[in-house]
Amino acid sequence: MLTIAPDLYLRPVTVDDATALYKIIDSQRTYLREWLPFVDLTRQQSDTALYLQSIVSNPADKVFVIIFEEAVVGLIGFKAIEYFNHKLEIGYWLSEHQQGKGIMRRSCSRLLQHAFEHMNMNRVQLKVAIGNHRSSNIPEKLGFTLEGIEREGELLNGHFHDLRVYSLLKREWQAQQQMN
């Protein structure tokens, strides 16, 4: 478990989280569909359970549920982990009703600490669809560098979308920590 605050922490995901995560997805389809390609593929709770089973059965995956005020409110984790090159990517989503509280920024910050201090990573990357301003605010507030645009990097709602590619290096993160 990765503690962030008394009312906010990250817990490794389990298949038992399928019910809570599916309820969020199913009740917020219109909102989540705008930026998340998996929403339309998640038609029933068993789809979520199958996805979670694939994560749990792969020890290389590091995915966490976000727990705020004792409720599951989203998902965050590492993907595209390259241990040899000491780099990875963070992916995330959060319930519409929990937006604007700093939950995702603080969750990403905690994952950065974990990646740099405990996983010996040198580079962390985030990709955000152009136009997803809430999501772009997170790497910008955390001191990431916008490296460029991955053209047509994600198929979303039947159309390819360009992605902003952000990165943060371990030395940059360490310099930030010294300043705080």
Image: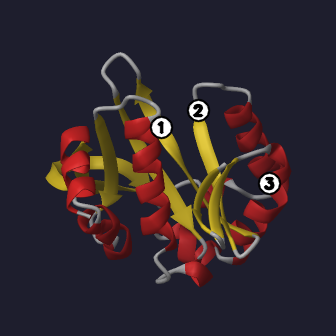
Residue 159 spot, x, y in % from top left: 38, 57
Label 3 SS: helix
Question: Alpha carbon of mark 2 to alpha carbon of mark 3: how far?
Answer: 16 Å
Answer with left or right where residue 155 lies relative to residue 174: right
Decide: is 167 above or below 21: above
Label 1 SS: strand
Which residue is denoted by mark 2 in the rendering? 61
**Which residue sits at x=30%, y=67%?**
136
**Which residue sits at x=65%, y=70%?**
6
Q: Is residue 35 visible?
A: no
Residue 113 spot, x, y in % from top left: 41, 47
User: In the rendered picture of this protein, how many numbered marks are placed on residues?
Assistant: 3
**Which residue sits at x=84%, y=49%?**
46
Decide: is 176 above or below 80: below
Which residue is denoted by mark 3 in the rendering? 17
Label 2 SS: loop
Residue 79 is marked as 1
Decide: is 168 above or below 39: above
Rendered image quadrant of residue 128: bottom left
Answer with left or right where residue 12 lies relative to residue 146: right
Q: Residues within 10 Å of mark 3 (few under 14, many from 20)?
A: some
The quadrant in which the C terminus is found is bottom left
Q: Which is more toward the observer, 140 or 152?
A: 140
Residue 125 spot, x, y in % from top left: 31, 44
Answer with left or right where residue 108 lies relative to residue 24: left
Amino acid at dot 3: Asp
Question: Alpha carbon of mark 2 to alpha carbon of mark 1: how far?
Answer: 7 Å
For the residues bearing labels 2 and 1, Cβ distance under 8 angstroms: yes
Decide: is 24 above or below 168: below
Answer with left or right where residue 104 lies relative to residue 153: right
Q: Is residue 38 visible?
A: yes
For the residues bearing labels 1 and 3, Cβ distance under 8 angstroms: no
